[in-house]
Image (cartoon, rainbow, N blue to C red):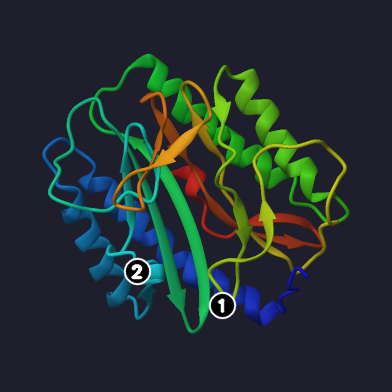
Amino acid sequence: MIPIKSAREIELIKNASGILFKVARKLTEYVKPGTRTEDIDQIAGELIIENSAKPAFFGYRGFPGNICVSLNDELVHGIPGPRRLKDGDIISIDIGVELEGYFSDGAVTLPVGRISEEAKKLLEATRNALKIGIEQARPGNRLSNLSCAIQKFIEASGFSIVRDFVGHGIGSELHEEPAIPNFGQPNQGPMLEPGMVLAIEPMATQGGWKIKVLGDHWTAVTCDGLLSAHFEDTVAVTKNGPEALIGMSTL
């Protein structure tokens, strides 16, 4: 069953989302050649705690970082470490914030210095796929219409959509019902209702859609070694339509 949040609960998620956006915006200042991924992680952790919140990913199922930091062919769940960013990299930053028992979850993929034209296209297509997915988060719409819209857009842009990871509901738990694939046939699955809160997160690849998890048991990479991108926002379904609570696509 998909939880329906009260207005107060959505306000709490919105408060957590506001902190997440503030942190994400600050981190963009450090996305440049020479920065270590563990430095970005440390700054994120400090900023979240300074705002009286908690890094939601730290310790989650044993994850060792405050945030996930994934480079190039790394799709999601990259572990921060001593690696330094290089000119031409792309970096995905995935942040979770818990505030007063409620969660927000958001991700963005950013260029490091000057990147290739193909990488620019991948980032822009994934960013726009998030916007298209959010637009589908309307009362009365079937969940799979959201999934289908994301897949169609990514594939029409010349890229592939990942099957192994999906979006999810969010609220008093980091991961709630429903699972939100980024692919599928239209007009299937549950009907969206006001009060649902969804973490919509298109994940696209430059080549094939197959991924694998590395020996650290966390980092998911593309099987063909080509680039991947990930955007995510926490979105409330309201009677007036979708409301993106973070605004990650604006970064």
Say which amino acid is labelled 2. Gly
Q: Nearer the viewer, residue 105 or 245?
A: 105
Q: Does residue 86 sit above or below 21 in this rendering?
A: above
Q: Is residue 122 left or right of residue 200?
A: left
Provide the residue designation for mark 1.
Answer: 12
Q: Would you identify the image quadrant in which residue 45 lies?
A: bottom left
Q: Say which element carries label 2.
A: helix
Q: Is residue 199 visible?
A: no
Measured Cα–Cα span from mark 1 to mark 2:
26 Å
Q: Would you identify the image quadrant in which residue 31 lies?
A: top left
Residue occupying the point 29% across, 22% down: 115
Say which amino acid is labelled 1. Leu
Q: Would you identify the image quadrant in which residue 163 lies?
A: top right
Q: Residues within 10 Å of mark 1 (few under 14, many from 20)?
A: many
Q: Say which element carries label 1.
A: helix
Percent position (x, y) of residue 229? 44, 35
Provide the residue designation for mark 2.
Answer: 62
Percent position (x, y) of residue 3? 73, 73
Percent position (x, y) of residue 44? 27, 62
Foreground tag (1 vs 2): 2
Q: Nearer the viewer, residue 144 or 35?
A: 144
Residue occupying the point 24% across, 58% down: 41
